[in-house]
Image (spheres, helix red, strand yellow):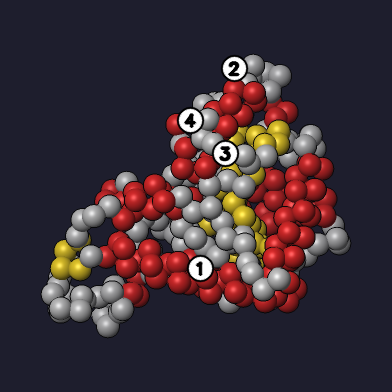
């Protein structure tokens, strides 16, 4: 995947490879550099920096992941409406092109910063760090990072978030946890979205989806939810409140909460090969 979609090198980390960038040359000065491990290391460094910002400002940061069209933006719209004045929300939106989703969030009166990734099929910590310059964290209680729609790469990168939430739409099939284990293993919560369609999509079994999830040795709670009908929305909001309190308690103890980054996902991006780069 890395060699075909270009997802390793993004607009956020490209500066590390160009000109006098930190990873432009090896210590030996040779022009062939082992890029990917260095990029992951730099990503994790920036992610830790992002998390420090969140912790210092008392912000719960959540990485929302799913395939395209699973209803992440609709969920955010209804979450913003439901929480009202209780919690202050901001959103970082990731998409290959367009600001459509960010505009939908702004129409709800919430700050939304769009990251257009071009060819990259995930967000990385560098991109999120850049977006944070447009967010006043003093005015935020929960920051949602709506990742690019993709069931593989988004689980492999630490963005600085505290929790991972993965959506599984009932239109996708209940076997997705078995077919895409990396992103479901990384989830702290799995939402079966568009649950209002279950009566007409009787080939999707929530119990089978949960069975596939448990076979991954995941203990993540699973909530069937419909942003359209409101089914399950209260459970989702309760999970958010509990997550915020848990992270705040950790920070008060001088610690932090790290997401479950999947090592096998990172291996997709850091498999041992060298990329040859020619520099002028």
First-in-chain label (4 vs 2): 4
- Kindly indicate the quadrant of the structure image that contains residue 205: top right
Residue wearing tag 3:
218
Give SS at disc 4.
Answer: helix
Q: Nearer the viewer, residue 269 or 188?
A: 188
Real-space Cα separation, disc 3 to disc 4, in angstroms: 12 Å
Q: Are marks 3 and 1 in contact (CB under 8 Å)?
A: no
First-in-chain label (3 vs 4): 4
Mark on residue 211?
none
Which residue occupies 46% across, 62% down? 124
Residue wearing tag 1:
47
Residue wearing tag 4:
178
The residue mark sitting in front, 4 or 2, is 4
The crowd level at tag 4 (other Cα within 10 Å; few <14, some 14-19, many 20+) is: some
First-in-chain label (1 vs 4): 1
Q: Nearer the viewer, residue 172 or 223?
A: 223
Residue 173 image offset from top left, x and y in percent: 54, 26
Q: Nearer the viewer, residue 122 or 166?
A: 166
Real-space Cα separation, disc 1 to disc 4, in angstroms: 28 Å
The answer to whether any part of residue 193 appears in the image is no
First-in-chain label (2 vs 1): 1
First-in-chain label (2 vs 3): 2
Q: Is residue 170 above or below residue 278?
A: above
Q: Are marks 2 and 1 in contact (CB under 8 Å)?
A: no
Q: Are marks 3 and 4 in contact (CB under 8 Å)?
A: no
Left or right relative to 46: residue 58: right
Which residue occupies 59% across, 51% down? 164
Give SS at disc 2.
Answer: loop
Real-space Cα separation, disc 2 to disc 3, in angstroms: 23 Å
């Amino acid at each position: 995947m890395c060699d075909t979609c270009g997802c390793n090198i993004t607009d956020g980390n490209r500066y590390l490879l160009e000109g006098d960038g930190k990873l432009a040359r090896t210590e030996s000065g040779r022009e062939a550099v082992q890029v990917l491990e260095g990029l992951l290391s730099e990503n994790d460094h920036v992610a830790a920096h992002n998390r420090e910002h969140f912790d210092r400002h008392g912000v719960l940061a959540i990485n929302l992941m799913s395939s395209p069209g699973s209803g992440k933006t609709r969920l955010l719209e209804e979450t913003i409406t439901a929480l009202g004045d209780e919690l202050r929300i901001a959103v970082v939106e990731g998409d290959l092109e367009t600001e459509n989703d960010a505009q939908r969030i702004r129409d709800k009166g919430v700050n939304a910063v769009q990251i257009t990734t071009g060819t990259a099929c995930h967000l990385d910590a560098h991109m999120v760090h850049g977006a944070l310059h447009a967010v006043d964290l003093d005015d935020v209680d929960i920051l949602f990072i709506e990742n690019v729609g993709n069931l593989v790469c988004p689980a492999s990168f630490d963005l600085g978030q505290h929790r991972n939430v993965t959506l599984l739409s009932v239109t996708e099939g209940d076997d997705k946890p078995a077919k895409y284990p990396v992103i479901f293993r990384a989830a702290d919560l799995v939402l079966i979205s568009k649950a209002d369609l279950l009566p007409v999509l009787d080939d999707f079994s929530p119990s089978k989806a949960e069975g596939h999830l448990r076979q991954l040795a995941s203990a993540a709670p699973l909530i069937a939810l419909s942003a359209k009908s409101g089914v399950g929305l209260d459970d989702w909001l309760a999970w958010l409140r509990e997550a915020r309190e848990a992270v705040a308690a950790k920070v008060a103890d001088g610690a932090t909460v790290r997401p479950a980054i999947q090592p096998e996902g990172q291996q997709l991006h850091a498999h041992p090969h060298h990329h040859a780069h020619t520099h002028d």
